[in-house]
Image (cartoon, coloured by chain):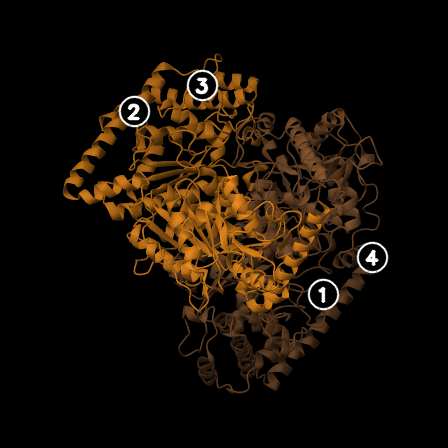
Chain colours: A brown, B orange
Amino acid sequence: MTTRTQLRAATELDRLCVDTIRMLSIDAVQQANSGHPGTPMALAPIGYVLFTRVMRHSPGQADWPDRDRFVLSAGHASMLLYSLLYLTGYGLTLDDLRSFRQLGSPTAGHPERGLAPGIETTTGPLGQGIATSVGLALGERMLNARLGDDLIDHHTFCIASDGDMEEGISSEACSLAGHLALGRLIVFYDDNHISIEGPTSLAFSEAVGARYRAYGWDVQNLGENLALDAIEDAARTAMSVEDRPSLIICRTHIAPGAPHKQDSASAHGAPLGEEEVRLTKRVYGWPEEPPFHVPEEALAHFRALRERGAELYGEWLQRVRAAGAEHPDLAHELERLSRRQLPTGWDEGVPRFHVTGTMTATRTSSHAALQWAAARVPELVGGSADLAPSTLTVIDGADDVQPGAYAGRNLHFGVREHAMGAIVNGLTLHYLRAYGSTFLVFSDYMRGSIRLAALMGVPSIFVFTHDSIGLGQDGPTHQPVEQLAGLRAMPGLAVIRPAGANETSLAWRYAIAAREHPSALVLSRQGVPTWNPAAVPDDAIERGAYVLRDSYREPHPPELILIATGSEVHICAQAADALEAEGIATRVVSMPCVENFAGQERSYRDRVLPPAVKARVSLEAASTNDWCRWVGDAGEAIGMQSFGASGPAGALYERFGLTPARVALAGRRSVRRARERGRVR
Amino acid sequence: MTTRTQLRAATELDRLCVDTIRMLSIDAVQQANSGHPGTPMALAPIGYVLFTRVMRHSPGQADWPDRDRFVLSAGHASMLLYSLLYLTGYGLTLDDLRSFRQLGSPTAGHPERGLAPGIETTTGPLGQGIATSVGLALGERMLNARLGDDLIDHHTFCIASDGDMEEGISSEACSLAGHLALGRLIVFYDDNHISIEGPTSLAFSEAVGARYRAYGWDVQNLGENLALDAIEDAARTAMSVEDRPSLIICRTHIAPGAPHKQDSASAHGAPLGEEEVRLTKRVYGWPEEPPFHVPEEALAHFRALRERGAELYGEWLQRVRAAGAEHPDLAHELERLSRRQLPTGWDEGVPRFHVTGTMTATRTSSHAALQWAAARVPELVGGSADLAPSTLTVIDGADDVQPGAYAGRNLHFGVREHAMGAIVNGLTLHYLRAYGSTFLVFSDYMRGSIRLAALMGVPSIFVFTHDSIGLGQDGPTHQPVEQLAGLRAMPGLAVIRPAGANETSLAWRYAIAAREHPSALVLSRQGVPTWNPAAVPDDAIERGAYVLRDSYREPHPPELILIATGSEVHICAQAADALEAEGIATRVVSMPCVENFAGQERSYRDRVLPPAVKARVSLEAASTNDWCRWVGDAGEAIGMQSFGASGPAGALYERFGLTPARVALAGRRSVRRARERGRVR
C-alpha cells in the first residue's frame, strides 16, 4: 500500500485537503444562503480519512459492484459528500457546488440518489440512512454467501448524527444488525452535543455506547481525538471485528474554528454569514477571496484517488476473471445481478388459477405465486415483521437468514416495520429483489421508508395483508381504513389490490419486473372467489383496470358501471346479477391498480369507462375520498366513513353496509340520476 | 393496611383467584374461537398482584383523577384486562366476557378506551401502550407540580411484550422517560421468548435490561420467579426508586400449564382448542364444565376491592377537602381539569390580524395565536421533535420541562416524532391540553399515534409546519405531497390548513376547544398575505369552508368558483383578479378544513358551492386525489403530480405550475366546458 503510506506522510497536505472540504462547504452554503455549514466542517476529517485512506472505491467506476458503500445518514451535511465527490473525481464539478440547492442542480439540499454518481442512497429524513445501511451491509453478506469472497467482499460505512440515534427506526435497525452480527457495517456517530433546539442534553442523555453494546455491537469511543490517524486506526479496528457491527463515537464540535459559531445551534441549519465566513477563513489561514478556492496540490492529491481506485477495480476484475474461469456461472450471476437483469424467461408460465367452488384469501394465492416467483428468481428474498404465519410470505424450503448464515432467503425482521422498510430498500439497492410484509394498517409505521423507496425509484416490494375490516375480530386498531388513500397519494408507488388468485399472481409478476418504482401488494385475510382466468387479461395490473364482466347486451354500452378492487369485486358481481335481472345492463370493472389505470392513454380509459355512461358506483372497504374521480357527479362511492369494529368479517360488512343490496340500491339511484340528466338534454 | 395483610395470608385463595383469571381467559377465547389465550394466562399473576395488592385504584370510581394508571401495552392479551375488570367490579359482566370479540360487545379484540370503565387507553398496535404510558407518567408529574401531592400523586403501571420492546416508538419514548427521570413509571416486561414466527431468538437477541439501563432506567430481573410476593416486592422496590423509571423483567411461559401448548407460538394468537382447554383445566384442577366458572370465594375476594378502593378514594377526598380549605384555587383547578372544562371565557378575544403589506407565514401567525391561547389556558403544554425554532411552537416565558422540574410548559421531545405523538396522547388523557410539532412530511413518522388519538377520540393537537414545496431548498425529502390526502382520509381527525393569520388563530381556538377528536394544524414556512379579518367568519374552521371573496355582481351567482387552502388561496385570488377583468364572475372559496365542510348541512354547502355552478378549479400544493369531489366533472384540480425538488420556493411554484396564470387558464377551460354543457341542454 505505497499509496497509503505516502498519504500518511503528507500531514501538511492532509490538513490542506481537510480544510478544502470545510471551506467548500461553508462557501456553498453561503452562496445558496441556505443549508447546514457546521456539520460538514466537523465531519471533514472523518470523510477525508474514509475516502482517501480506508474505503476501497473507485471514483471512475462509481457502479463497481464490490465497492465499499458510504452512507451519509446525516443528510443535512450534504456538502461534505458533494465536496468529496467533486474533489475525488466522481463527476460533480465546482459549478455544481456553486449551484448548491438550486433548481435542477445535482447538489440538492439533501443527497438524492440518481442525481450524481457516488450518492448511494437518498438521506435527510433522520434514521433512514443508518437503517438503509443495515440493509446494504446485510445485502453484501447475502451476495457474498452466494458469490464468494472474490466477487463480493466489502464494507458499508455510515456517518450518523444525534438525530439518527434518537429516531426509533435506527433503534429497530441496529438491534437487528446486532442480532445478525453484521461485522461489515461500521457507523461513525457524530456526537456534537448540538441539536436544533439547543444542547442535546435538553432531551437526550442516554448512554449511546452502552445501548449499542446491548445490541451486540462493538463500540469504540474516540472522545475528542479526531486526529486523522486516530480515525483511521479506529476504522481499521472496526474492520477487524468480523462478528459484530461497529459504532465509533466521535465527540465533534460543530463549525470548528468559526470564531463566533463553533458549538452553537446557530451553526446547524443556517449559513455562517459573510462576516463569519471571512473570519473563519482567517482562522484557517485560507484566502478570503475568491470563494470556492481549491488549492492545486489538494485537488491533485484527491484526484490521485482515481488512479488508485482504478488499480483496486482492476485487481478485482482480475479476481473475477480468475474466479470466472473456475465458476463461470458465478461470474455471470454477478454480472446479471449488478445489471439488475432478471433471469431470462423468468416470467413465463405465471400461475393461473381456475374457478373453484371454494373461497381463497388473496394472501393465500400470494403465497402460491411467491413460490412460483422464488423458484425462478434466485435473488428474490424477504420476510415479515413477525407476522409471516399470517402474511404467508415464507419461501418454502429456503433457509432462514441468521447470524453468520446469510445464504438463506427468509428474513425475520422482528416487530420492526419501519426498519424493515429501510432494510428492504438497502437490500434492493444491493442487487437483490427484496420484499417485506406486515398488516396493511401497520404500513403507517413504515411510511417514511416506503416514501424513500418511491422518491429514489427503487423497486422494493411491500406486502400488506389483512387489508380491510375483513380481518374481523382483531378490531379497529388492526383494521385499515385510510391506508389505501394514503398510499395511493404517494407519487411513484404502485398500489395493487388484486381481486382474486389470478390478479394476485399477475401482481407478483408485475412487482418483480418493476425496475424503477416500488410496489405495495394489498391482500385480503378473508376468502374471495377465484375469477375465470380467461376473464383476467395478462396485462390486468399494467393496465390498472379492466372489464371483468359486462352486460349481456354487448356491443351496446352498459347503462351502469360498478367499479371495485380486491375483496369487494365479488360483492359488485352479486349486485350486478340483481341489476341485470331488473334489466339494467351492468358492467363490472376490476381496478387492481388505480394509478396505473390513471396513466393509461385516454382511448383505453374510455373503453373501460365510456364517458357516455354516467351511472357509476364504486365499492371499496376503505376511505372513499379518492373515488369521486372515477364515479363522477352522477355516481356514488361506497366505502368506510368511520373506523371499523371488532366482530366477525361477515357481520362487519353488513354493519358498514358493504353489501350487494346497498350497491344495487346505489346503482339504481345512479341510473335514475343519469337518465334524468339525459332527459334534460 | 390490614386489607393487604389479609390478602397476603390467603395464599390458597390467591392461587384460586389467579387461576380464575386464566380460566376465564381461555374460555372466552375458545368461545369467540378467536384471540390470544397464552399471554393472559402467563400474565395473570402480575395482573392479580397489581390490581389486588399494589395499585391504588377504586373499581367503583374508575374516573378517580389520582388513581394509579394501568396500561396493557400487550393489548392482544385483552382478556387479562377484561377478566380483572369483571372480577374487581369495574362494571364488565360475565356476559360481556362471553361475548368477547363479538360485534357491539365492550370486550373488543384489543382494549378500546371508552368501551368499558377501567380501559385507560386503546392498545394493540405494538409500542403505543408503553409510549402512551410515558405520557401518562409525565402528565402525572406535571399535574403534581401544579396541584401538589395531596391532589395528584400516583403511579403508572404498564405491561409490555417483546413486540413492544422491538418497536422503535418504545425506544424513543423510553429514552425520553429516562432523560426526564419519570420515577412514577413502572413497566413489567413479559419476556416469554415467543413471537409469532417462533422463538424471539429468531430476530431479537439484544440485552434488553442493559439497553434500559443505558436509557437511565432502574432494571430488576425476576427471572422465572413469578411468585406473587416476588412480584409485589419488585413492584414496591420500583416504587421506592423515585428518580428513574423502572423496568421489571419477568421470564414468563406462554400458556403455562397447557399440556401441549405451553411455550409454543401456537398458543399466542389462536384458541387452545376444546380438547386442550379441557386438559388444561384438569392440570389446574378446574371443573371442565361449565365454561366461565367463577368460584364464589374468588369473586368475593376480588369484589372486596370495591370496598377497599372506596376507602382509598374517600381518604383522597379528605385530603382534597383539607387542601381545598387552604388552597381552594387548587381544588377548583383539579375539578376543572378532571372534568376537562376549559377556563370560563378563555376563548374571548381571539387574535384578529389586520391587512398589512407584508407577507406572514402561518407558522408565524400560529406562534402569536399560541401565546394568546397559552395565556388563557394554563393546561396548554407542548413542544416539538427538535424543530421548535422552525415550527415556532414555544410558549414564550414558560419554563422547560426537565428532569425533576415538571412545572414548565415547554417540552423537548428530541428527534422522536412517533413517541411525541403517543406522549401527547398520554398527556391529553391525563387532563392536559397538549400539542406536538414537527414538519408535515414527518407526520409520516407518527401516523401510528395520530391514528390512535383519532380512534380514541382524544383531542390531541398536532402542529405540522413546512407544509408544501413552499419550504424550498431542503428538497423533496422534506417536501410533503401526499400527507394531506393521507391525513384527511383518517376518520375523526380534523385537518386544518389555514390561509392566513386570521384563519390560523381561529384554528388554534378550534383545536383547543375540541373535546372528542384530535386536530392537525398544517402551516406554511413561506409568507402569505393577511386577509381582511372582516372577510374571515368567526366560524370559518367549524364550517370548514366559506366564500372569501366573490364576483362583483352579487347577488347573481358566480360563473366560476376557485377553491383553495392555505398558502394557495392568494394564488387563486390573483387568478380571480385576471378572470374578473375578462368578465368572468369568479368566486374564491377558502376551505381550511375539508372534513368539517363535508359535515355541514347541504344548504350551507350549496350556498358556498352552488350546484348550478359547474365551472370549478381547486388549487393545493399537494396530491389532488381527493379534490375531484369538490370540482366535479366539469372542474379541474390543480396540485402536485410528483415529488418536489430542491430550489427556492418561488422557482418551485413556477416549475410545478402552481401559478395564477395556470389557475386562470384552467378556469377559462372549465367555464367553457360548463357553458357547452349548458348549451346542450
For mark 1, give the secondary structure: loop
Say which amino acid is labelled 2: Arg
Quarter of the image where one finds residue A195: bottom left
Q: Is residue A551 visible?
A: yes
- Between A433 and B97, the one nearer to me in the picture: B97
Q: Nearer the viewer, mark 4 or mark 1?
A: 1
Residue placed at 49% from the left, 24% from the top? Answer: B100
- Between B376 and B137, the one nearer to me in the picture: B376
On the picture, is B455 further left or further right than B681?
Answer: left
Give the mark, 2 or 3, whose residue is nearer the N terminus: 3
Q: Nearer the viewer, mark 4 or mark 3?
A: 3
For mark 2, give the secondary structure: helix
Q: Nearer the viewer, mark 2 or mark 4?
A: 2
The quadrant the C terminus of chain A occupies is: top right
Is B482 drawn above or below residue B220 in the view shown? below
Distance from disc 4 to disc 3, alpha carbons, whole Å, reads: 70 Å
Query: What residue sits right under mark 3 in the picture?
Result: B95
Residue placed at 77% from the left, 46% from the top? Answer: A606
Q: Chain of mark 4?
A: A
Number of the label disc, if any, that sits on residue A328? 4
Query: What residue sits right under mark 2 in the picture?
Result: B306
Give the mark, 4 or 1, whose residue is nearer the N terminus: 1
Q: Chain of mark 3?
A: B
Q: Position of residue A404 (x, y in %)?
A: 63, 50
Q: Chain of mark 1?
A: A
